[in-house]
Amino acid sequence: MKEKSKIIWFEPIVFLFFGVLHLHRIWALIDRSSYSDYWLSLMENRGWFYFVLMGIMSFLCVAGIVIFIRDKGRNYWWRWFYIFGGGYVIFDLFAILVGLEIWESLLYKMFDVTSRYWNILWGAFIGLGLISFVIGILITKKLLIRK
């Protein structure tokens, strides 16, 4: 069996960042209207914060995918998230950027505060955030132990 590749210093950052990004969605369960208004406004107005956030997300996803491809056959289990999660995020950001009509329609439905699926949808994202954050902590521990 091949030896695992070296853990890169920013790998825990990827998971901790996306963990916090998704965990903040607890706000959606506390105050639907302000959460929805904030994010829809951010997407529609596309100010500096929007582009900084999208740039960070894009960079982290592309870097993760590059690591996965570079270390093919020697990857840790969590690097599969770079391919599937990162691939999804890149597609999502691209669809938003080019104004893909079907994607835009889906986003507006996601932010519909009257939806009976609101808590399930945002609860699932919060769950993903918790998983991501925990993975980030586990990778950090593994990285510190290896040094």
Image (cartoon, rainbow, N blue to C red):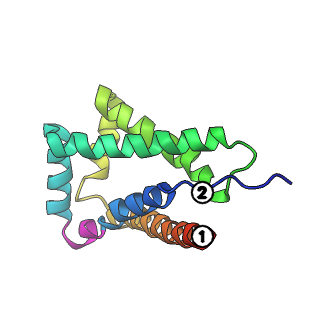
- Report the amino acid beneath label 2: Ile
Q: Taking 50 as reference, is 126 left or right?
A: right
The residue beneath circle 1 is: 142
Task: Give the spatial CA distance, label 1 vs label 2.
Answer: 9 Å
Q: Position of residue 71 (x, y in %)?
A: 67, 43
Residue 117 x/y as whole percent: 36, 61
Quarter of the image for residue 83 reads top right
- Give the quadrant of the N terminus: bottom right
Quadrant hosting residue 77: bottom right
Magenta-highlighted stretch: main secondary structure?
Answer: helix
Can residue 117 be seen in the rendering of this structure? no
Between 93 and 121, the residue placed more toward the observer is 93
- Circle 2 sits on which residue? 7
Disc assigned to residue 85: none
Q: Earlier in the sequence, mark 1 or mark 2?
A: 2
Residue drawn 78% across and 55% down? Answer: 3
**Mark 1 belongs to which amino acid?**
Lys
Badge 2 element: loop
Quadrant, the C terminus: bottom right
Residue 98 in the image: state x and y as whole percent. 31, 26
Residue numbers of the magenta segment: 26-31
User: Circle 1: is it few (<14), some (14-19), or many (20+) Cα within 10 Å?
Assistant: few
